Amino acid sequence: MMTDNLTPQQRSYCMSRIGGKDTKPELAVRSELHKRGLRFRKHVKHLPGKPDIVFPSAKLAVFIDGDFWHGFRFPAWKHTVSDFWKTKIGKTKERDRRNFRKLRANGWRVIRLWQHQIERDFDASIRRVVSAVSDPPQR
């Protein structure tokens, strides 16, 4: 197990510097969607989880999640992190599930794009969003 080589105050400072908005994958996806003529809202505060990209008319919320921060396949690697990270990532995963359920209960469709998916096949990630926007839910 990895131990933290920073004091709690140093770790707190480092963590406070990590931005949750406008990450590289998010900027790349937004830029490509905009180039394709799609218009959307960013970080809509009144929706659960403040989705990264929102298409209100299509009732589509898109989350762009980092593999580490949101715990992609967490059970496979959680033994490599400290108890602090196990707790933090576990809470994040539960919050994500809760927000997705709330959105779906209110009639929203939710797409989650993982960092590794965007990096591995950017075009497929974009097609997934474009397809969902092009096929709005029936009212």
Image: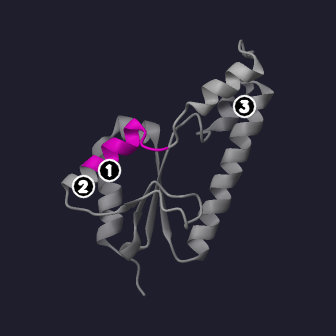
Residue 34, disc: 2
Label 1 neighbour load within 10 Å: few <14, some 14-19, many 20+:
many
Q: Which amino acid does label 3 sit on?
A: Trp
**Crowding near the residue tagged with mark 3, few <14, some 14–19, many ≥20 C-alpha atoms within 10 Å:** some
- Tell me the tag on residue 50: none
Report which quarter residue 40 is drawn in. bottom left
Vertical position of residue 48 compared to residue 122: above or below: below
Could you tell me which residue is drawn at 54 percent across and 37 percent down?
A: 67
Residue furthest top as drawn: 5
Q: Quadrant of the N terminus?
A: top right
Query: 114 and 54: which one is in front?
Result: 54
**Considering the numbered disc 2 on the image, is that residue within a helix, a strand or a loop?**
helix
Residue at 29%, 55% in the rendered image: 127
In the displayed structure, 77 sits above or below 31; it is above
Q: Which secondary structure, mark 1?
A: helix
Does residue 23 lie above or below 128 as drawn?
Answer: above
Give the residue at x 61% y 24%.
14
Mark linked to residue 85: 3
Which residues fall within the magenta stretch?
21-31
Q: Earlier in the sequence, mark 2 or mark 3?
A: 2
Mark linked to residue 30: 1
- Measured as percent of width and height from the top left, residue 123 is found at 27, 46
Q: Where is residue 109 in the image (x, y as percent from the top left)?
A: 48, 69
The three-letter code of the residue at mark 2 reads: His
Q: How many marks?
A: 3
**Quarter of image, res 118:** top left
- Residue 119 point in image, percent of width and height: 37, 35
Q: Distance between the residues labelled 1 and 3?
A: 29 Å
